Image: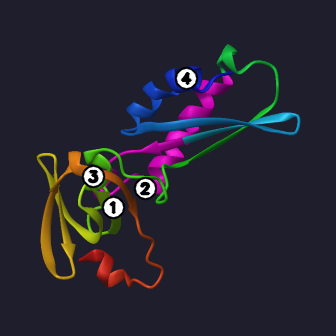
Amino acid sequence: MESATITSLVAPVVASCGLEVDRVEILPAGTRRVVRIFLDGDGPKGRGPSLDEIAEATRAISTVLDDAPAMGSHPWTLEVSSRGASRPLLEEKHFRRNTGRLVALSTDEGRVVGRIVRVADEHLTLDVDGAERTLPLQRIGRAQVQLELNRSLDDEQE
């Protein structure tokens, strides 16, 4: 069982749920294997998949894998989740799906921390200390969402 094989099996059913496969991990767990599938997508508000979308995709993935000879005869456990807030932002869609969130990124000019205002035409606009700053995505080396445990729901909805 290889992650590329699993990806090719589940990608069509995941796409039919309006999502995409971000990555697949296969890990040994005693006598079993754990198949972890991480999904991404725009979701109902353009900010990533909802729990309902993940649940729907999980049922479809489970059905496909249960019927696939590629899974072999060894016992396995399926885990399906979103791509996760701690994953680096690599593509324009990752930045767009995190609009409104605080990010830290490295550029050829150094480190920048700001809130994503908008993403369009391969450019990222951040609010950095109250001033907007626009950067071409190609100049961003590493970018990651900064978790804000004390941010209110009112702030998130703005």
Q: Secondary structure at mark 1?
A: strand
In this rendering, the answer to whether 5 lies above or below 57 is above
**Three-letter amino acid code at disc 1?**
Leu
Q: Secondary structure at mark 4?
A: helix
Which residue is identified by label 2?
50
Q: Residue furthest top?
A: 69
Q: Position of residue 39 (x, y in %)?
A: 47, 43
In this rendering, the answer to whether 61 lies above or below 124 is above
Q: Position of residue 106 (x, y in %)?
A: 32, 59
The residue positioned 25% from the left and 55% from the top of the image is: 108
Mark 3 to mark 1: distance in Å? Answer: 7 Å
**Three-letter amino acid code at disc 2?**
Ser
| Quadrant placement of the N terminus | top right
Q: What range is drawn magenta here?
A: 38-66
Q: Residue 123 or 155: which is nearer the viewer?
A: 123
Q: Secondary structure at mark 2?
A: loop
Comes first in the chain, label 4 or label 1:
4
Graded by Cα atoms within 10 Å as few (under 14), some (14 to 19) or many (20 or more), the crowding at tag 1 reads some
Disc 2 versus disc 1: nearer the observer: 1
Mark 2 to mark 1: distance in Å? Answer: 26 Å
Comes first in the chain, label 4 or label 3:
4
Q: Residue 61 or 41: which is nearer the viewer?
A: 41
Q: Position of residue 158 (x, y in %)?
A: 23, 77
Graded by Cα atoms within 10 Å as few (under 14), some (14 to 19) or many (20 or more), the crowding at tag 3 reads some
Which residue is identified by label 1?
105
Which residue is identified by label 3?
140
Disc 4 versus disc 1: nearer the observer: 1
